[in-house]
Amino acid sequence: MRFRYRSEEEMKDSGVEWIGRIPNAWKTCSWRYVTEVLTDYTANGSFGDLAKNVKYLDYEDYARLVRLVDLRENLNNQGVYVTKEAYQYLNKSKLDGGEFLIANVGANSGLVCKMPMVEYPCTLAPNMMMAKFNHKLINNDFMIYSANSQHIQQQLKIKSIQSSAQPKLNKDDFREVLFVMPTKNIQIKITNFLDIKTDQFDSIISKKEALIQTLEQAKKSLISEVVTGKVKVVKTSDGYELIERKKEEMKDSGVDWLGEVPKEWDIKRLRFLGNLQNGISKSGDEFGFGYPFVSYGDVYKNTSLPKSVGGLVNSSLNDRRIYSVLEGDVFFTRTSETVDEIGFASTCLDTITDATFAGFLIRFRPFKDKLYKGFSKYYFRCDLNRKFFVKEMNLVTRASLSQNLLNNLAVALPPYEEQQEIYSALEFKIGGMDCSINKLRYQIQKLKEAKQALISEAVTGKIEILDEI
């Protein structure tokens, strides 16, 4: 399908700064006036009634509970299920396929997905909303494309961080979103065009993502082997060599998921290596000004904390003393939608002056000379720790990591000097892999930006979709 850019004479001011100019015959509208149904998991009853009537099952049963993590895997992952009785109780959030779904809690707030068509009963999980629009005015697929455009994602991002430390969208936030509305026939033409074009982008992106996945898996394996002592670090004239340790150099760690470790290494529970502290709790109007604030996203997205964080909070002198962020501190994500995503760690390599950290995090502060900060960076981000958390935690609506559980985490502890050698070796070895990964990520980012720009130009009428050649 062909397209052309509309001339200035064909356009008018939308009246909305971030939308800009739109075709003369189009109009701007809020989602409020085209939404017929807006619901979520909690619309079915009180928290007490939900807990009484709905039990999550980690084996296949009558209906699948659809979470954001499932949608991101296109429902090809291990699911969570509910009984027929629970499914019937969750009547207000049943899913038939094709629905407009939007994440409304956490780092992914504002992410919009389309519910896949499936042949089994499904119902919506917490932390998402489902919308149905006036079918006489709105093509559902057009609305999904529109919601993923730059001007709507910008609105959702701003709304999600206005009221709390953790990003969150409520139903009023949803209803206030402004979009551009052409006739339904034009919506369908735009949707057909974008289906073709986005498929082309997605094909290229998926190939590059597969390469990244291969490199990331190689990184994870390398890190696990080194930080648990399966291989020995040997410094050479041109870098570091990793040599597999002999059987007689190893001993049983006594921890299933750690396996064998070098004989000279200790196994210590985290409680004997430092202290834990949950993060600061503040009302929503205390954020956006004040002193540096380490957010959930700063930890979730980074192996080591950024030297300068973007968040701000109105913290007191006492807050900054209790919830300080010092060199060597390790921060763990405390809550997540699934067990698999809790316990992500990020190490502070340089003190962030006057900073505090989010209540959705736990800070581990090591005792002096117990843990080298560089070793912590790799050890606590290692996937092996996830096995411990998954084993110990029950499947719940929203997973939460307690201090007691974290204190019981086993740490394979080499001598301090060896910790430093391990860090230097991993920085050297991982550097080349990260260079390749970063190059691929940059290419993917540019492709995604081009894709989103095309979507934005189409749904706001900057381009006109012409008939097929």
Image (cartoon, grey):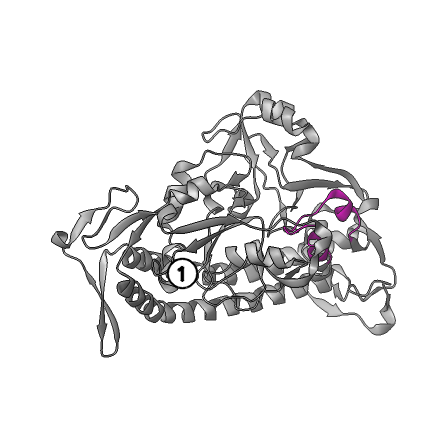
Residue 167 lies in the magenta-colored region: yes
Q: Quadrant of residue 99?
A: top right
User: Which one is nearer the viewer's eye here, 395 or 165?
Assistant: 165
Q: As rendered, which of 253 and 34 lies closer to the eye?
A: 253
The amino acid beneath tag 1 is Lys
- Residue lying farthest front? 318
Residue at the spot x=59%, y=26% of the render?
51
| Residue 146 visible, this orientation | no
Q: Is 436 displayed left or right of 36 in the figure? A: left
Residue 125 found in image quarter: top right
Q: Which quadrant is the C terminus positioned in?
A: bottom right
Could you say whether the residue bearing mark 1 is in a helix, strand or loop?
helix
Horizontal arrangement in the rendering, residue 329 relative to residue 96 (left or right): left
> Residue lying farthest bottom?
237
Residue position for label 1: 377
Provide residue 164's location: percent of width, then percent of height: 68, 50
Say how many tags the image has. 1
Between 77 and 313, the one lying in front of the other is 313
Quarter of the image containing the N terminus? bottom right
Q: Which residues are magenta?
A: 155-177
Q: Is residue 180 visible?
A: yes
Q: Residues within 10 Å of mark 1 (few under 14, many from 20)?
A: many
